[in-house]
Image: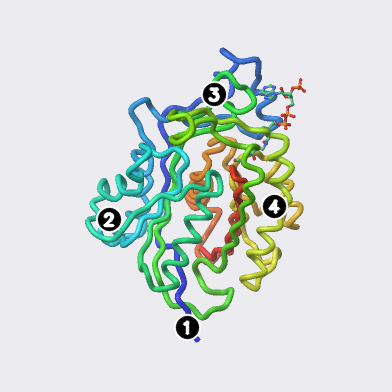
Amino acid sequence: MGVIRAVIKGCGHYLPERVVENDEFTETLDTSDEWIRARTGIERRHFAADDQKTSDLAYEAAIVALKNAGMTGNNLDTIILATATPDQTFPSTATRLQHAIGMTGGFAFDIQAVCAGFIYALANATALIESGHAKTVMVIGAETFSRIVDFTDRGTCVLFGDGAGALVLQAEEGTGSGEDRGVLSTDLNSDGKYNDLLYVDGGVSSTQSTGKLRMNGQEVFKHAVSKLASSGKKALEVAGLQASDVDWIVPHQANLRIISRTAKKMGVSMDNVVVTVQDHGNTSAASIPLALSVAEQRGQIKKGDLLLLEAIGGGLAWGAAAVRW
Ligand code: UT7
């Protein structure tokens, strides 16, 4: 019997012009290029210009994704934008993007699950498409973490970067098997007892200020590998697939050591893992769609490939998705 699948029609990304190499941090902090590379795999990241907002980054990525899908804004009926660094407290950054791309109908909203935001947005888009509530959905992750890091804290400020990545998904009939193109399964999780491991020390109803990012890196690291591997296995199981079917893991790009340990735990070779963390740093909700778009440009991922996406971040919130490109 036929089923409705959310199939990828186009992908795009945007990185701000300013590239910040690891060495730049040594001017103001007791750190080194060697430490940052060895502990994280990061070599450089991009920072938005002073006048660039999250919606500006999102716009650039969205335009490329629409072009690659052969569409314009008015072909979309929904935008789901994942961000922890919105332009304003309200309205949503998604509605700013909606107007910017000339989309005059439908609806747009933000999702906040920090670094897992793109997986959450993808799962919601898939549910809207599969239930018939939407036909053509843009899922986008866009962040300006350079605005919320504490540049006096060497344990966090060297890790993050700015950027945006976008996908266009459209309803298409599938067979219901793991051979279909599109989103085959998603697995979402969160556990609020870990709020204090990774958070921003400000907010509208608490301090009436934006605040700065705080993290217990070692603790987050410990949770990351086991939670990502188990969520990845769950997503494959739900899709009726196994690790040996995976062509590419496209992980959240936070730390190369987390990426490689998770791949090992899942029994997938690093030859089948998309890695962009060296050039982007951790771009939170933007990291997976950025990696997808870059990997497509590199010729790594191709139509029909089975991808396993996985991410974890503040909340803790984590999840995975099995997607046939
Ligand atoms: O996207 C959301 C998910 N977030 C993550 O996945 C992040 C997870 N955590 C991590 O990636 C790692 O824990 C970090 C990269 C944040 C830190 O690496 P680590 O190997 O866990 O280092 P550590 O925190 O145990 O620190 C080791 C040492 C400390 O010095 P002492 O106490 O041993 O003297 C730190 O003060 O490294 C020091 N250190 C630095 N040294 C030079 C911390 N940051 C730096 C730095 N440069 N930038």
Q: Disc 1 designates what residue?
A: 2
- Asked whether mark 1 lies closer than 8 Å to ligand 1, one says no
The yes-or-no answer for disc 3 within 8 Å of ligand 1 is: no
Label 4, label 1: how far apart the Cα atoms are:
33 Å
Q: Nearer the viewer, residue 288 or 189?
A: 189
- Please say if the residues under marks 2 and 3 sit with CB atoms less than 8 Å apart: no
The amino acid type found where label 3 is placed reads Asp
Looking at the rendered structure, the secondary structure element under dot 2 is helix
In this view, 163 is above or below 44: below
- Residue 205 placement: quadrant: top left
Q: Is residue 121 above or below residue 142?
A: below
Q: Residue at x 38, y 27 (%)?
A: 49
First in sequence, mark 4 or 1: give its number. 1
Residue ID for mark 2: 73
- Between the residue at mark 2 and the residue at mark 3, the CA separation in whole angstroms equals 36 Å
Residue identified by numbered label 4? 227
Three-letter amino acid code at disc 4?
Answer: Lys
Pick whichever of labels 4 and 2 is earlier in the sequence: 2
Number of other residues with Cα within 10 Å of mark 4, as a class: few under 14, some 14 to 19, many 20 or more: many
Which amino acid, mark 1? Answer: Gly
Q: Residue at x 75, y 52 (%)?
A: 264
Q: Which mark is residue 260?
A: none
What residue appears at the point 56 percent right and 49 percent down from the top-left corner?
Answer: 116
Query: Alpha-carbon distance for marks 3 and 4?
Result: 27 Å
SS of the residue under disc 3: loop
Verify CB contact (< 8 Å) between mark 1 and mark 3. Answer: no
Mark 4 or 2: the one toward you: 4
User: Callout 2, which amino acid?
Assistant: Gly
Q: Which mark is residue 150?
A: 3
